[in-house]
Amino acid sequence: MRSSRRRLATILALFAASLFCVALVVVRNVHTGNVDLRYLIWNLFLAWIPFALAVFVYDRWRRCRAGPLLFVLGVLWLLFFPNAPYIATDFVHLEHDPLIPYWYDAVTIAAFAWIGVLLGFASLYLMQTVVRQWRGAVAGWIFAFAAIGLGSLGIYLGRFLRLNSWDAVEHPSVLPRILHAVARDPFAYQEAIAVTVLFTAALSFAYFLLYNVAAGGLDLDAER
């Protein structure tokens, strides 16, 4: 019962924070009379997809353990997972607008980026829990860091090559061709490697810290 209430409170908090982010864009649009930054709302919607998939996978795992459906949903989760931390790259759109204070847009994008990353980490936490219960703690962490690495590659593909998650379904040969080209001549794709490594390191450190905090890493009473 306590666990259910805690999860409900977490989901409601994420939803309330998402509504706050949407309100920031709506207020901006009403004030300026334009529709700038509305793409953030769409990106936030995409960030909710891996979270919803992870909740479904976790609940189904607890009821009936592994199965073909869970594997398919896990792959689908991995395809959409990069959309969550991807919002952090939307700072590239931050620029001075005479109709709105610069700091307002900075706060708006930061709010969306923060909620996107939280949704991504929450979904990763649930998926890691499934893998940990299935194959052990080491396998769980290997899965988590591998997912972050692939997600970081997805961020590069989305921001620089403008590919989407559904391109893997509509054009399944695109990603293998890109990976093959990088493997053949990695020095020709230094930007791709640098972006992927940088995001992998940054997201890994952030996730590890939040994971330990969520697991009671700051529970000082536990030492007594």
Image (cartoon, rainbow, N blue to C red):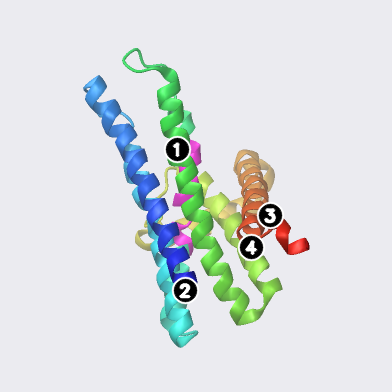
Q: For the view shown, which residue lies furthest in the bottom direction?
A: 64
What x and y, as percent, mark residue 86?
48, 45
Compute the Cα span from label 1 to label 4.
Answer: 24 Å
Is residue 160 shown to the viewer in this render? no
Tell me, yes or no, whether the two marked residues, 3 and 2, touch with CB atoms within 8 Å. no
Tell me, yes or no, whether the two marked residues, 1 and 2, touch with CB atoms within 8 Å. no
Question: Residue 29 is drawn in which quadrant?
Answer: top left
Mark closest to the chain's N terminus, 1 or 3: 1
Name the dominant secondary structure of the magenta segment. Answer: helix
Tell me the residue that label 2 is attached to.
58
Position of the N terminus, as image quadrant, is bottom left
What x and y, as percent, mark residue 2?
48, 71
Question: Which mark is nearer the camera, 1 or 3?
Answer: 3
The amino acid type of the residue labelled 4 equals: Ala
Compute the Cα span from label 3 to label 2.
Answer: 25 Å
Is residue 189 shown to the viewer in this render? yes
Q: Which mark is residue 215?
A: 4
Q: Is residue 83 magenta?
A: yes
Tell me the residue that label 1 is attached to.
111
Position of the C terminus, as image quadrant, is bottom right
Tell me, yes or no, whether the two marked residues, 1 and 4, touch with CB atoms within 8 Å. no
The amino acid type of the residue labelled 1 equals: Ala
Label 3 residue SS = loop
Question: Which residue corresponds to the image point at 57% horizontal and 57% vertical from the top-left?
Answer: 150
* Boundaries of the magenta span: 78-89
Tell me the residue that label 3 is attached to.
218
Q: Is residue 221 magenta?
A: no
Mark 2 residue crowding within 10 angstroms, few (<14) / some (14–19) / many (20+): many
